Amino acid sequence: MALEGHLRDLPLIDMLYIFQASHKVGKVCFTHGTDLGMIWLQDGQLVHAIAVNARTKVPLAQGEEAIALLFEWSDASFRFMELCADEQVKVSITSPLEVVLFNALQQRQSKHMRQSHLEPNSLVRLAPQLAPSCSGGISLSIDHWRIISHLVVETSVEQLADELNYSYDQLIKLLEEMITLNLVNIHTPLAVPQRQCMVGTSLAPQQQQRHVRSLVEAVKQRLRFRMQRGGVHVSH
Amino acid sequence: MSVIKVVITGPYATGKSQFIRTISEIEVVDTDVPVTNSEELLIKEYTTVGLDYGMITLESGDTLCLFGTPGQERFDFLWEVLAEGCLGYIVLVDSCRPAHIEDTFTLLQRFTQLTAAPFIVGATKQDLPGALPPAYLHRRLGLPPSIPVVGCNACDPDSVQSVLESLMDHIELILKHQL
């Protein structure tokens, strides 16, 4: 029986180092819900990786992007397999393992940082440049293309869902996939309602403003005075 | 004679108590107790569980009161009380702990809903090596360009003063736009 189990018992990072140290040749199949992943190894080096949705057959990522995605599948099951006798292995990964792992972990971290900020008012815009690891090509669904063609200008998540007729959850899932591919940038502005200068409520608005202005001026004057005197008197 | 209330808020261990202590004329009334949470203990030994209170008397006889909120979320019920009727508030963010940026963002979201008072952000610990620049924190916090982020050192009176002045300038600017 070949090596098989769950990534929760043998983390991907350990597995890849073990294969590298033992100069393994073969492939590993990963199953994560309806998603499938596969990595190919030559002399212990990662040479190719791909992730697809088994149900829709839509490729999710390949090369280094797929490795980054595999790091998300902490509960996936895996099975090591020998290469078939006549199997031609595509090469989409040429960087040393350390570099691949570093990039994958970095991408995972920045993705988490960006996803944690996905709010209805988050602004979505096309990434000015694809990640270098995407140079081997990426596959997009029609939904991804709909979003891309709509992003002529920076648009909020809420507006995008309205205009493209997606449910909010559906759009978030698509945007998360696009973030993984580095296709879009997300920026969440803090929603700050208009500020009002009011101290107490018994005064009319005009009087309020005059009152606040005089208080601010008094504070500024006091602070200026402190500066001239070389500090306020501090009694402690 | 008026009492002018300014609130100093921010997540855990950003220097709120120190900020008030540095500028207050009176000995600060604090409610610091030894930290019991082992994770928090790694950051500091004492923490504010109620509020900090400092004071500056103005030439006009009015009093500028500085209220510091407790940093931990479990005391956030006090924020509403403290925010009520304040002239403005200062949100402190630790320039040396990127892990706290998310907490500051959450706090900003809460506070901007609690009160419509004007606010600025003070990026503390700017004197420490490797401190993140205020412009970077401005971007990471997703702040509108109109909200200033001022670098400061909560132990330095001049620095604390300049943050307070920035808040007053900001309030004046808002007043000007309201006219």
Image (tube, coloured by chain):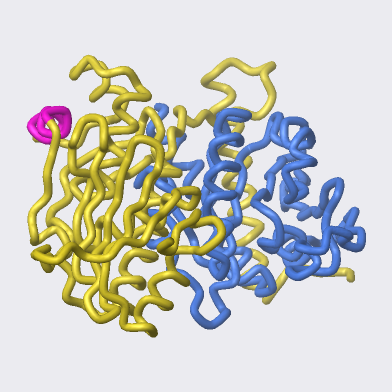
Chain colours: A yellow, B blue
Prevailing secondary structure class for the magenta stretch in the rendered image: helix
* Magenta highlight on residue A146: yes
Residue located 34% across and 79% down the image: A98
The quadrant of the picture occupied by the C terminus of chain A is bottom right
Depth check: give the residue in front, B128 or A39: A39
Residue located 65% across and 29% down the image: A199
A217 lies left or right of A226: left
Measuring from the top left, give residue A119's x and y in whole percent: 41, 33
Measuring from the top left, give residue B142's x and y in whole percent: 40, 46
Depth check: give the residue in front, A35 or A159: A35
Q: Which image quadrant is residue B33 in?
A: bottom right
Depth check: give the residue in front, A212 or A34: A34
Q: Is residue B22 visible?
A: yes
Q: Is residue B2 visible?
A: no
Residue located 57% across and 47% down the image: A217
Instruction: Specify start and end residues of the magenta stretch as a single range.
Output: A142-151
Measuring from the top left, give residue A52's x and y in whole percent: 24, 43
* Magenta highlight on residue A189: no
A169 lies left or right of A126: right
Depth check: give the residue in front, A187 or A173: A173
The quadrant of the picture occupied by the N terminus of chain A is bottom left
Residue located 42% across and 50% down the image: A73
Q: Total of numbered circles in the picture? A: 0
A100 lies left or right of B8: left
